[in-house]
Image (cartoon, grey):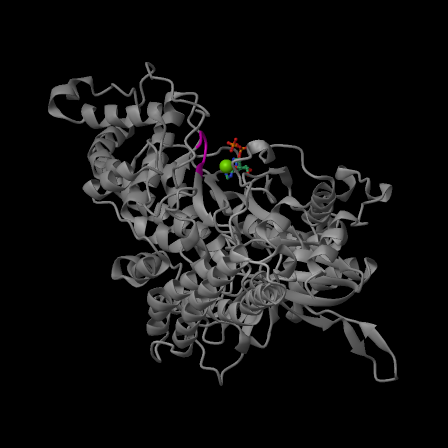
Amino acid sequence: PPQRRFDSLAAVKDSPLRLDGEQRVDLGEIFGENTFSLSSMQARLPKPTYKALLKTINEHTPLDPSVADAVASAMKDWAIERGATHFTHWFQPLTGLTAEKHDSFLSPTGDGRAIAEFTGTELVQGEPDASSFPSGGLRATFEARGYTAWDPTSPAFLMEGPGGAYLCIPTAFASWTGDALDQKTPLLRSIQALNTQATRALALFGSPAPRVRATLGPEQEFFLIDEEFAYRRPDLVVAGRTLFGAKPPRGQEMDDHYFGSIPERILDCMNDVEVELYRLGVPLKTRHNEVAPGQYEMAPIYEDANIAADHQQLTMSTLRRVARRYGLLCLLHEKPFAGVNGSGKHLNWSFSTDSANLLEPGTNPHENMQFLFFCSAVLRAVERHQDLLRVSIAHAGNDHRLGANEAPPSIISVFLGDQLTDIFEQIEKAGTAETSKEGGLLGLGVDALPRLPRHAGDRNRTSPFAFTGNKFEFRALGSSQSISFPATVLNTIVAEAIDEMVTNLESRTADGVEIGEALRALLSEEVPKFKRIIFNGDGYSDEWVEEAERRGLLNLRSTLDALPSLVESKNAELFEKYSVLSRRELESRHEIMVEQYFMTINIEGETAADMARTMILPAASRYLSDLLQCMERADDVGIKVAGVEATARAVAEAVDGLVEALDHLVKQNAELGGEEVHDKAEHMRANIIPAMNAVRERGDELEKMVPDDLWPVPTYRDMLFVK
Ligand code: ADP
Ligand code: MG
């Protein structure tokens, strides 16, 4: 019944949910309490066992089975003391989400009783039923099995709920043929590749380090919408975004939301999210309102890439889960509301030794030499592999944002800032004949060094990839996506650039050239090759699109434009060379990405048709019927209702338009464009998206005509402005 909408408005207003004082927490006490951390391991394990485990964690040495047994037993005790009854291998299949299959610790003793047991074998390897996870042809459906393998470098943790607690063990997920079926495996391999090449470089520079680690700090944007509204919208429930909805009268022009105070219920919810995540050892640091009404952001302090990626998945799932306690639905979709700012994810990325961030400009000439080397390696890598960075953020949801004047364009470029750009220009000039006498210009290895900018403010928010003083910020990620693949790409392409540049330097120094001089010479050759990727101007402008084309930069506008480059031989060889993904693994990923694009739009197309047929059309016909009744009665008593008649005609016309567009969409939905997933995906782009847009246009037109009390779904105004 129509009056439901008013019920839900009341429900929002009277929402009883509040945190009580009990939630006051001591951060120092709760942080990490639900993780089986190094300190809890140290406290519970015999010294030699702990040492062996530490060696595995730090140096990736194989784990001794007896060590695994001891760790499993300590882990089980720790979990059971906290009320856990089950354990699960927690992994990240290529759906972008996380997966788990629970096993209880229960082990019957044969006399009608049972004890809790957890062996090293159970810790180290699991065998989930893998048949329902995407494998991109790597695993024939009859071979349903896959296996999970413990990742000792990411701490196990306890998930608690009203229904009990269970132990989660971070794991990698592979097919029985040994092919990676998850996000974690290639990420770990890419971290290793970067480590190998960066430590090689440091040794050459005379500052050897035992290891170099990639670091990640992801900023997460999301919407929180009252679930009273959200659950009345099949599109939000099924597709995570609205497929209909006229633009609200008051949009994000109202800037007061951004950095304004956070509404109380939302704040309570965010607090609760944070407390849960603190318990899980996720170091959340900032929270604030975002640009759009109903939109917020949270960001952690950066961590080692592998742990940061696990923590990012936990952040997304905790947001979704906790929001419901507050009667809210957390929307992580890139574009839940048309005409309203979408949601992205900024991936801050760098790499460091145990003591120094290698993308931090130095305070002395030697450090600056290293910095310029590593910074150049990043520029070189991004220039050469624009296509891979673009693919790493390509999915149906992100197509609504990229290049849509609110998000970075689909052209990959690097913002460096004026000072640093100037330095690279000087390096380039210094390499040319006229100025080569000033070989010491940049002062590499010389005391008279221009100071490099430290933490130069980056006020340019339009660049997809920006240097922000001591790290790069990859800003084009979609809010819903896993950060693992973009990070994997960054680590791998930069490992390659470092590798090739170090090899070049090695051959120069072998000829007796001093390292500073060798680097100067190398950079003056490199800068001209990569400088076209540097762009400090307005990335949202049309001029940039033209300029980028003149520079020959790629502009892969949509997901299906971008995906083919993933499997080009340049990229397959790169991933193979650094043992990050085999060709088979890469091809399977490509297949899965195409399939997910198809499935996403396919669901949207079906849902849009359903809503138009079963919600919008009936509402419009009811209204038309009201109008016609009114005209009939008016006629009975001899009153002229020309306005009503005109309205009836307009509504009838709009309904005709809707039905026509709907018929077309239904016809397109019935066709799949072929048997091959690539053909189906192409059908989605070429036919379903335009058909869906046409239906939406008609539906939104009707929303502005049909009386508010007859409109069957919550409007943008309801969802975005009632808090
Ligand atoms: P700003 O955006 O103002 O520069 P911060 O410097 O605090 O803000 O960083 C924003 C995000 O970048 C945070 O999530 C932070 O943890 C992350 N970050 C900072 N330093 C690094 C680093 N070395 N590696 C990866 N991420 C980092
Ligand atoms: Mg940022």
With respect to residue 646, does 677 lie above or below?
below
Please tell me which residue lies in front, 281 or 643: 643
- Please give the name of the residue rendered at 34% of the width and 71% of the height, measured from the top-left corner: 678
Residue 496 in the image, given as x and y percentages of width and height: 32, 48
In the orientation shown, which residue stands out farthest toward the front?
638
Please tell me which residue lies in front, 188 or 589: 589
In the orientation shown, which residue stands out farthest toward the left?
433
With respect to residue 107, does 501 lie above or below?
above
Residue 45 in the image, given as x and y percentages of width and height: 73, 54
Is residue 126 at all visible to an observer of this figure? yes
Is residue 243 at all visible to an observer of this figure? no
Q: Is the magenta stretch mostly helix, strand or loop?
A: loop
User: Where is the C terminus found, in terms of image quarters?
Assistant: top right
With respect to residue 448, does 715 lie above or below?
below
Residue 470 part of the magenta-drawn span:
yes
Question: Would you say 337 lies left or right of 277 here?
Answer: left
- Please give the name of the residue rendered at 76% of the width and 44% of the height, measured from the top-left corner: 30
- Please give the name of the residue rendered at 15% of the width and 20% of the height, measured from the top-left corner: 435
- Label count reads 0
Residue 582 in the image, given as x and y percentages of width and height: 37, 65
Question: Would you say 87 lies left or right of 140 here?
Answer: right
Please tell me which residue lies in front, 709 or 496: 709
Image quadrant assignment for residue 421: top left
Residue 292 in the image, given as x and y percentages of width and height: 55, 41
Q: Give the range drawn in magenta.
A: 468-472
User: Where is the N terminus found, in terms of image quarters?
Assistant: bottom right
Residue 195 part of the magenta-drawn span:
no
- Please give the name of the residue rendered at 73% of the width and 54% of the height, measured from the top-left corner: 327
Image quadrant assignment for residue 521: top left
